[in-house]
Image (cartoon, rainbow, N blue to C red):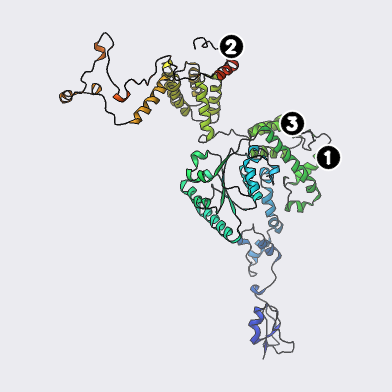
């Protein structure tokens, strides 16, 4: 039987075995050399089509192996188009070879230096301490579903990752800012399948969980309740207001506090140590190898690496907060203190500022560097967040406590943070009636005038009108008789909303109503030269005194400890003049 030439390996193969030969990858059914071939001897071998070629262009193979290169650049290039081939081959293969490391080196310092274990975690000792309930749960291998509530940069994401690593569970991470219910359902189905096949649990970390609406939050309920998944949600908003009651009942809320100055200093010192520890290894590597895999905590630029070498050899290195010399001449104690102050308990902000300092020139003027750091930090005031309500509450309570200085401070904090002055003015109108009330009849008109001034003038001039009103209300005498009287009357009104108006107090505009007894027995007070009596309250509340008399202190509390504290802190140690009358 004649043989044919295999189009791939060019070896002679019998015609009946050609398909088997191709299926085996050209390894079997090769005909002996003496077998006749069906190809004429005088016919030259034709050039194989590109589809049968086992060799690829070196550059094309490099692109195809790189997962970060778009698929359009990894397709085979037709050899017939010289122009197309020139365009692809003209791209530097080194550029795409280094693409993964370029992405890695662009990660901020705060992300690269995340703790890898709980021992490296700073702050939140009430949660990570050896005697804490969370650590006891970790020892048992079960943490359940948690809601981590705290300000930005306090360690919510890092703590969630460390918890998942400690209990050896599958870890999936989503962000409510970029994910939806379809992404969540995919993770939930995967978690259920993994649990049923391998018995291994899954922890889903959902960052910014408060961004999900009520319908989206309900997706988690059955899986959490049945134990098919453990969810850790992170939020900067109050869970009581932003999360559903059903989800809160299935999760434990852990409150993370803002980091202290000592915590921030520890984070900065640890970050500098990790940068220095990786610098020698970075200096020993060749340039191309450093570009492919930069050490954690070092800058990818060659100039920064050379700067680290030159600084490490300097004999004029400053002293750090803990004593050891630092090779960064610009990182002085004053700069570190400024970073701690400007970060305001936010570790991410502190590390970002540290990254700016390390990237600056070592001979840069300290005052110019500090000024640049201050300009790079903006005030953290959220007009719709937790601080919005906390500061207006502090302002109101300062006025109620006649603390004019504190009230002025919180007023300035809110206005400089960008708060709407009309919002503050409306609260001052409420404060004028709630806290000053009957003690000063001028308080409410002044507050209304301040509100009108804010509407007509606006910022920044209306800050003066607000300061005028805040100062007056703080120094005005306080009286809550009207406010408390309404609260007592409201409770009585809700007991029985169907109680009829007494006949003597009813309106009688027609003769029929007068015949029915409306307003019968009513004494018109201005008609008398002396006081007269009328029954205006329903029978059930006759004799009740909702508006207390002036000087009635029957429902007030006497706390000797608090009085002594006030005398020491605010009265200069002198006795309160009202002690004798009390």
Upstream in sequence: badge 2 or badge 3: 3
From the image, state whether disc 2 or disc 3 is nearer to you. 2
Count neighbours of disc 3 (C-alpha within 10 A) and say few if under 14, some if 14 to 19, many if 20 or more: some
**Residue linked to disc 2:** 574
Identify the residue at horizontal 49%, vertical 41% (top origin): 242
Q: Is residue 68 above or below residue 346?
A: below
Task: Check residue 170 in the rendering and tell me which mark sits there, or answer none.
Answer: none
CA separation, marks 2 and 3? 43 Å
Residue 309 is situated, as x and y percent measured from the top left of the image, at: 80, 43
Specify whether 463 is left or right of 323.
left
Specify whether 33 is left or right of 186.
right
CA separation, marks 1 and 2? 63 Å
**Residue linked to disc 1:** 313
CA separation, marks 1 and 3? 20 Å
Quarter of the image where the N terminus is located:
bottom right
Comparing 373 with 145, the one in front is 145
Total numbered badges shown on the rendered structure:
3
Q: Is residue 214 above or below residue 579?
A: below
Specify whether 312 is left or right of 394.
right
């Amino acid at each position: 039987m004649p043989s044919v030439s295999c189009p791939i390996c060019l070896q002679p193969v019998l015609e009946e075995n050609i398909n088997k030969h191709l299926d085996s990858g050209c390894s079997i059914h090769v005909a002996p050399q003496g077998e006749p071939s069906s190809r004429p001897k005088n016919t030259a071998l034709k050039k194989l089509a590109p589809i049968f070629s086992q060799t690829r262009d070196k550059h094309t193979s490099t692109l195809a192996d790189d997962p970060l290169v778009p698929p359009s650049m990894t397709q085979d290039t037709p050899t017939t188009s010289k122009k197309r081939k020139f365009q692809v081959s003209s791209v530097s293969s080194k550029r795409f070879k280094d693409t993964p490391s370029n992405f890695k080196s662009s990660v901020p310092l705060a992300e690269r230096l995340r703790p890898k274990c709980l021992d490296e975690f700073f702050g939140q000792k009430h949660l990570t301490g050896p005697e804490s309930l969370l650590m006891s749960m970790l020892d048992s291998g079960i943490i359940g579903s948690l809601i981590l509530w705290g300000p930005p940069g306090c360690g919510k994401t890092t703590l969630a990752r460390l918890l998942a690593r400690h209990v050896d569970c599958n870890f999936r991470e989503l962000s409510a800012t970029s994910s939806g219910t379809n992404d969540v359902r995919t993770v939930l189905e995967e978690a259920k399948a993994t649990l049923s096949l391998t018995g291994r649990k899954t922890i889903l970390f959902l960052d910014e969980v408060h961004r999900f609406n009520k319908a989206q939050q309900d997706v988690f309920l059955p899986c959490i309740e049945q134990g098919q998944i453990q969810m850790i949600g992170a939020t900067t908003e109050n869970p009581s207001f932003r999360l559903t009651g059903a989800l809160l009942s299935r999760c434990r809320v852990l409150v993370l506090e803002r980091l202290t100055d000592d915590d921030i200093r520890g984070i900065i010192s640890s970050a500098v140590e990790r940068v220095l520890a990786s610098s020698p290894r970075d200096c020993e590597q060749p340039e191309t190898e450093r570009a492919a895999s930069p050490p954690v905590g070092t800058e990818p630029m060659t100039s920064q690496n050379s700067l680290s070498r030159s600084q490490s050899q300097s004999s004029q290195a400053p002293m750090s907060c803990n004593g050891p010399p630092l090779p960064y001449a610009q990182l002085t104690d004053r700069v570190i203190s400024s970073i701690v102050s400007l970060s305001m308990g936010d570790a991410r902000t502190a590390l970002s500022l540290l990254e700016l300092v390390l990237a600056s020139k070592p001979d840069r003027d300290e005052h110019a560097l500090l000024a640049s750091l201050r300009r790079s930090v903006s005030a953290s005031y959220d007009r719709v967040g937790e601080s919005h309500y906390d500061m207006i509450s502090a302002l109101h309570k300062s006025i109620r406590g006649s603390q004019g200085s504190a009230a002025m401070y919180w007023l300035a904090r809110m206005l400089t943070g960008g708060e709407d002055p009309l919002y503050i003015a409306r609260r001052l109108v409420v404060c004028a009636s709630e806290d000053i009330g009957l003690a000063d009849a001028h308080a409410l008109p002044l507050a209304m005038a301040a509100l009108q001034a804010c509407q007509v003038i606006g910022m920044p001039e209306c800050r003066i009108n607000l300061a005028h009103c805040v100062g007056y209300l703080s120094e005005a005498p306080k009286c809550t008789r009207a406010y408390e009287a309404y609260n007592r009357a409201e409770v009585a009104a809700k007991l029985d909303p169907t109680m009829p108006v007494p006949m003597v107090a009813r309106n009688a505009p027609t003769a029929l109503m007068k015949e029915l007894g409306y307003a019968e027995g009513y004494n018109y007070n201005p008609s008398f030269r002396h006081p007269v009596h009328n029954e205006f309250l329903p029978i059930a509340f006759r004799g009740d005194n909702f508006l207390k008399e002036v000087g009635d202190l029957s429902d007030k509390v006497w706390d000797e400890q608090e009085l002594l504290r006030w005398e020491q802190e605010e009265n200069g140690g002198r006795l309160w003049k009202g002690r004798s009358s009390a």
